[in-house]
Amino acid sequence: MRRDALTWYLEAALAGSVEVRALRPLGIDGPTADPRESGARGTGDPKAFGYGRPIQIDLLLDGVPRSYVLSTMRVGSGFGHDHFADRAGALIWAHDAYGRLPRHVKSLDVGFITREGELRSAGGAEEFFLLMEKVEGASYCADLQRIRRKGTTTSLDLDRTGALSAYLAKIHARKGHDVQLYFRRTRDLLGHGEGIMGILDGYPADYPLLPAKQQYVVEAGCLAWRHHLKEKVKRLSIVHGDFHPWNILFREGTDFTLLDRSRGEWGEPADDVAALSINYIFFSLLRRGKMEAPFTELYDRFYGDYLDRTQDQELNQVIPPFYVFRALVIASPVWYPNLSEEVRLKLFRFVQAMLRVEQFDYRDLNRYLA
């Protein structure tokens, strides 16, 4: 944060001439001269950690002494603040909410700091948007629909499956070392609004194919899996996060582009593997009500090739809860409203099997669907 940029920003935000006189850390994140900030280290306050990083700014505004506080958030602290978007969301919410609570300190603006150290205002934002380039290509789902309809695969189908497994093996090779971030991602698998609990909350009340008591069993079983996954922190890897056929656009041959990366840069590789491979199961169920050729050929090629490339000896021990998540999405009457009852029931049987299995066997899928 450049001092001259801070002055320019404050003059725009405060609508006056500004002379910055002093910057002082506040609270538990550093020493303070303000006796109201009793959270400082060394004051005897038992609290030694906070999410914020506040700085007091002493200035002259049109010649009049004033003080303000500018606060950012800790990076890499865990507690759901691991990603830039988490921290941005928390600060945007604070700006919107502080002023609506009686006796609460008011927020004057919310903004961001650029890579060049400039401060920019975002206080007038109503909704945020994303502007992206347009990419040509056909969804990989179109390939799977054709295979389902014709009942055969081509050499290009196998090559594309191999290209996708090779891509995942390559990005998953980059490992991270943030224990709290791995905990976050495994926690989000169960408790995030886009995770298992959020998906189940989207099911109709008293849904007859998966009533409330069975939903409880699913959530309780996933809790046990979460504690199993917490022992696997060394698996933290670069991931896509939503690697399913609708997010993969193919052009000629095996040339493809991905869409809609989700839920963070780092995560569990099994999530990506499950996200794609369950669709080979899904389309086979749509075709014949069981796992059989030609989709077994694609599944074995994808899963087996990934194992050969990565030598990931733990994958079969950690993938079941990620299959639970993906199966619940596909079986959801909200997400996939036109499925037959038979297909949904087999997906729910698959969920139940994944909650019980200790070592997944990718070569015996029909056992999990029976």
Image: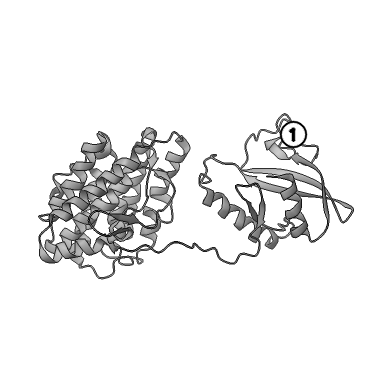
Name which quarter of the figure residue 310 lies in.
top left
Q: Residue furthest bottom?
A: 338
Residue at the (37%, 45%) spot, across then down: 239
Expressed as whole percent of the image width and height from the top left, the position of residue 101 reads 69, 60
Can residue 225 be seen from the camera position used here?
no
Can residue 169 be seen from the camera position used here?
yes
Residue at the (15%, 62%) spot, across then down: 147
**Number of marks drawn:** 1
Residue at the (16%, 60%) spot, across then down: 285
Expressed as whole percent of the image width and height from the top left, the position of residue 56 reads 76, 44
Q: Nearer the viewer, residue 53 or 368?
A: 53
Q: Residue furthest right?
A: 63
Give the side of residue 108 with respect to residue 340, left or right: right
Give the side of residue 78 with respect to residue 18, left or right: left
Q: Is residue 37 above or below residue 261?
A: above
Residue at the (10%, 62%) spot, across then down: 151
Give the side of residue 212 with respect to residue 121, left or right: left
Residue position for label 1: 31
